[in-house]
Amino acid sequence: MAGTIVIRAFLPSLCRLPARPSLWAALTVIAVCVPDGPRAADVVQPRVADLMSLALLASVAVSLARGGARPGRWALLAAPAALAATVAALAAPDFLLTLPGLARFLQVFVLVPVAVTVAVRQRSDLLLVGGAVAAVSIVQAGLGCWQALTGSGASYAGLPIRAVGTFGAGEVMALAGVVSFGLIIALAVALTGGPARRAAALVAAAALCPPLVMSLSRGTWLAVACAVAVMLVLRGARLAARAAIAAVAAAVLLTLLTLLVGPAGGVIAERAASITTSVDQPDRSVADRYQLWQAAAGMWRDHPVTGVGPKGFAAWRDTYAPLALSSGSDVEDPAGGYRREPLLSPHNMYLLVLSEQGLLGLAAFALLVGGALVRTLTRPGRSGPAGLAAAGFVTWLAVDFAYADIGGATSLVMSVMLGLATGWTGAAALPSRRPAC
């Protein structure tokens, strides 16, 4: 009898669960953990996360049709970027070539973020989607640590020590991005929660730091440092000053520890030191990146208004790239073995937009990123957990885009985070129960 009562009480909620958009947003995040295996660089192949994002869009469309939700302000902020990308595709020399790039740009920067702002309508939605991001970051961090410590990661300088999680050597920066998101969320909770929650969040944030270092992603290190600094300043100048002193002490301790962990420690120390020499003494990867930037600038000079069209950089790269540019990047991991990955993007989102969408696209994209940054840094309630995480993430995004661009399944995690960051109204302002449709 008691079991029957419980089933009757929860059955309506269980039946409505698949129609809950925030569930599909969380599943989109979780789906990035599914390994894809070897992928052809020049072939468009949908991933499991892409299918989950389609389910999210369908669920949100149904919710909008029923009148139970409405698009947030992000839809207005992203509209110029969507229009500029479409114009660039129509004006491109090869329209059919631009269609996959246009679809990806709209998916990552327009459709999924707008869908997430619609999906997060109560505090439980915020916890569900944010919790999925945190859980994925912890899982990938644990696997990355295991790879680095056991020598089963991606190859770097001839050593299989680079933490890549389930993403493989083809997406060496993916783990760093996902772990960064979890670190930002954990730090936001640690700075605002009660004693028990704060302690748990601090432990989680501390546990996410080693795999972030082992990812060897210098651009991500800088982006995380900027995000943490902004979050601390928003909480108070004194806290930021104390944290700066602690960070210096931690850096000294980390430097000493790298001397005790063998070859991996030497690689980490060398990788960190290369940040300060990237201008006057760039290594091979940095030199290639500078040459890719030159190619992007050349495309823009010849196509100043609308660029060469979305996904056009890869097609026009050899026309504009210097002869010294490497033909590809050497990657190796236990799953895929040794292979060459072609350099098909400038590894700078701003230059990618400039080359493919021209000044029109860059202005619209700057409005999108800048508007999100201003919104999260100036909105009332930004010192709460949701506000701090939003400000930290958008700061991370603005800095990271100077060293990276969109690519791979983790772009959808970034897209979901973008929707959370721009659509949040503060946890206290969200209702505890979903409004009746």
Image (tube, rainbow, N blue to C red):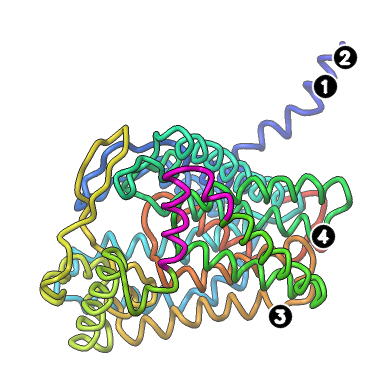
**Residue 212 image offset from top left, x and y in percent:** 53, 52
**From mark 2 to mark 1, how far is it between C-alphas?**
6 Å
- Image-based side of 297 in relation to 10, left or right: left
Q: Residue 192: which disc?
A: 4
Q: Residue 287 occupies which quadrant of the picture?
A: bottom left
Q: Eyeballing the image, is 233 above or below 104?
A: below
**Left or right side of 224 for 284:** left
- Mark sitting on residue 2: 2
Q: Earlier in the sequence, mark 4 or mark 2?
A: 2
Mark 2: give few (<14), some (14-19) or many (20+) Cα within 10 Å: few
Image quadrant in which the N terminus is located: top right
Residue type highlighted by circle 2 = Ala
Give the overall secondary structure of the magenta segment: helix
Residue 298 drawn in magenta: no
Asked which secondary structure carries label 2, the reply is: helix
Compute the Cα span from label 4 to label 2.
40 Å
